[in-house]
Amino acid sequence: MAAGKKTGKTGPSGQKGGPHSGFSPYQRLQFRKKRPLLQRVSPGSGLFNWPLWPWKKVSLYNDIASMLNGGISLTEAIQTMAETQRGSTAALFADLLERVEAGQGLGQAMAEHPERISPAEATLIDTSEQTGNLPDALASLAQLNQFKVDLLKKNMFMVVYPVILYLASLFILNLPLLFSGKSHHYFVLVGTGLLILFLLAGAGLFAVTFVPLRRVLPWLRAIWWHIPFASIPLKHLGLTMYCKGMAAGIDAGFGIDKTLEIAAKLSSMPGIDAVNQRIRERIGRGDDLFSALSASRLFSISEMSSIKAGEKAGTLEQVFQKLATTHMARFSSTAKVLMWVVAAGIFAVIMGIVAYRVFQGLEHATIGNLNQINNEIMNQNKAIHYIK
């Protein structure tokens, strides 16, 4: 074979062979662990496209913020995350690394994966990147997701409450079958109900892989926003994110129009988007921020007083941060009340059905027993009459 035909490459020690032939076995093992991560398929192109859950985002954002505060560059921090994560999360960070190395910002790279990372979070990260406040933005997003996790933990029983009631009703509703001696039918019905529950849960989880949540949520929010009582927590959550966006834009030194655009993207609420558009139109006609916000009635009178004072004192960023904290607390309290009301309604409906079915079963069982006793008495009377 001619020399030009050889495909072997020269390693660090001068030997010919593969590209890793000059490395020690340990070095080759480390290379195999790291290198394939950058060659994986983009996480947005796979069949199973799960979002990053809040508890996962808490650790991811905190880890990146800690590395950046420790003096590690953004590229090295993302590469470290790609090497330490597993599965689709590792593939996500590998794709982010490729995009950042190609010249994109982290927020712009995250915006390419709206099913995994919300556009609001990507917008806030992109804005903070331009002003050098990326670690603070990541830490703020970690706190926001930690709040969601804590809220879910505190109300975990309320989340699974309908399932518990359903399982309890399966056993209670069919108790009359046991009283009537039809135990076989009882266990068949209970088993069928449990099977239907598991099939529905499995179908729901599997549907998430085909219908990305980010495409469905805007429709659900648009419907939910117009429900009188149920929309209260959603409005407080939208105002929380809106205030965070306003604070981030003001702190970054952006113009008022750009700041309002960031706030609207961060809130991602249909009602707030429409109001924010009217605010931008009024500012375009020459109104100041206080007048435009007052006309929109997005904030209460006391909140507008704080905004006016902050605008005069030059502390508008701190005012919006406090308003975000206030609306977050209101979201927590109203969400709990809403969950208790929904749970109470479900409890009342299911217990009513259970009571009706139980009494109906007992009534049938009692009437059946009385008919059986009456037939026995009639048979005895016939026998006595025959003997006579």
Image (cartoon, grey):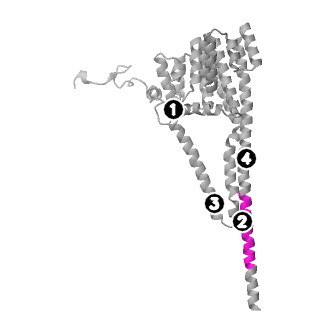
Q: Main secondary structure of the magenta part?
A: helix
The spot of residue 285 in percent (x, y) is 62, 10
Q: Is residue 136 visible?
A: no
Q: Which residue is tagged 4?
A: 347
- Residue at the spot 47% in from the left edge and 36% down from the top edge: 47
Amino acid at dot 1: Ser
- Residue at the spot 59% in from the left edge and 26% down from the top edge: 60
Q: CA distance from mark 3 to mark 2?
A: 20 Å
Vertical comparison of 152 with 293: above or below = below
Amino acid at dot 3: Phe
Give the label on residue 187, or none. 3
- Label 3 or label 1, whichever lies nearer to me, is 3
The spot of residue 53 in percent (x, y) is 60, 32
Determine the secondary structure under disc 1.
helix
- Label 1 or label 2, whichever lies nearer to me, is 2
Tell which residue pokes out farthest to the bottom in this image.
388
Magenta segment: 357-376
Between discs 1 and 4, the one toward the N terminus: 1
Amino acid at dot 4: Phe
Q: Which residue is tagged 1?
A: 88
Q: CA distance from mark 1 to mark 2?
A: 57 Å
Between discs 3 and 2, the one toward the N terminus: 3
Mark 1 packing: few (<14 Cα in 10 Å), some, or many (20+)? many
